[in-house]
Image (cartoon, helix red, strand yellow):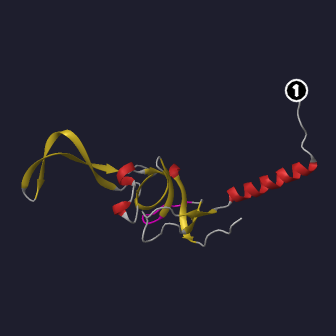
């Protein structure tokens, strides 16, 4: 079995790269580039913001960076664990809905859903053009990547 020893010069270079890379990933704050208009007018496409990896307590109104099957997104917390909301379901049968004293046949069903521990309901500020918890459901805390702390200037080009 043959192996190659790293020269002292290459070892120092590799160590420097590891320290710089490690220190970048260890930083508690990260610049985030906003893509899309789902958070307009609060955040615009192409704007740079800062997100903290130290999430701490999550409250209604916090803006979070989340990971979904559709990708990384920026959304506002609408509901927290313990909150209840109504979800509309479609099914093949019919059910009577009573509204304003009149009965109406429908193939929709409404069910009350309560968020479990570590579940959060996320909405985009521009809710008419936002893909959010209304489509993909509540987000688990483990899918939260950061909490937006402030707006920043674009990072310096390297």
Q: Nearer the viewer, residue 107 or 102?
A: 107
Q: Residue furthest left?
A: 102
Q: Which residue is mark 1?
A: 1
Q: Residue furthest right?
A: 8
Q: Which image quarter holds the C terminus?
A: bottom right
109 up-or-down from 99: above or below: above
Q: Residue at x 78, y 55 (%)?
A: 19
Q: Quadrant of residue 2?
A: top right
Horizontal placement of 150 versus 6: left or right? left
x and y percentages locating residue 50 in the rendered image = 58, 67
Q: Residue at x 9, y 50 (%)?
A: 104
Magenta stretch containing residue 74, yes or no?
no
Magenta stretch containing residue 56, yes or no?
yes
Q: Nearer the viewer, residue 80 or 78?
A: 78
x and y percentages locating residue 82 in the rendered image = 38, 54
Mark 1 neighbour class, 10 Å CA radius: few under 14, some 14 to 19, many 20 or more: few
The segment highlighted magenta reads 55-62
Q: How many marks?
A: 1
92 up-or-down from 73: above or below: above
Q: Nearer the viewer, residue 156 or 119?
A: 156
Q: Which image quarter holds the N terminus?
A: top right
Determine the main secondary structure of the stretch shown in magenta.
loop
x and y percentages locating residue 120 in the rendered image = 43, 54
Q: Residue at x 76, y 58 (%)?
A: 20
**Is label 1 in a helix, a strand or a loop?**
loop
Horizontal placement of 123 versus 49: left or right? left
Q: Residue furthest top?
A: 1
x and y percentages locating residue 90 in the rendered image = 23, 44
Horizontal placement of 83 versus 16: left or right? left
């Amino acid at each position: 079995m043959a192996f190659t020893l790293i020269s002292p010069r290459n070892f120092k270079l590799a160590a420097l790269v590891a320290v710089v890379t490690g220190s970048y990933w260890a930083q508690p704050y990260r610049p985030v580039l906003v893509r899309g208009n789902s958070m307009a007018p609060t955040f615009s496409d192409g704007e740079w913001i800062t997100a903290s990896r130290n999430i701490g307590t999550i409250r209604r109104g916090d803006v979070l960076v989340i990971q979904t099957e559709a990708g990384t997104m920026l959304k506002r917390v609408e509901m927290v664990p313990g909150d209840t909301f109504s979800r509309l379901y479609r099914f093949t049968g019919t059910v009577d809905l009573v509204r304003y004293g009149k009965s109406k046949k429908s193939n929709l069903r409404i069910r009350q859903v309560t968020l479990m521990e570590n579940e959060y309901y996320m909405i985009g500020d521009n809710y008419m053009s936002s893909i959010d918890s209304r489509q993909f459901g509540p987000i688990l805390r483990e899918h939260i990547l950061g909490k937006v702390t402030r707006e920043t200037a674009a990072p310096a080009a390297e």
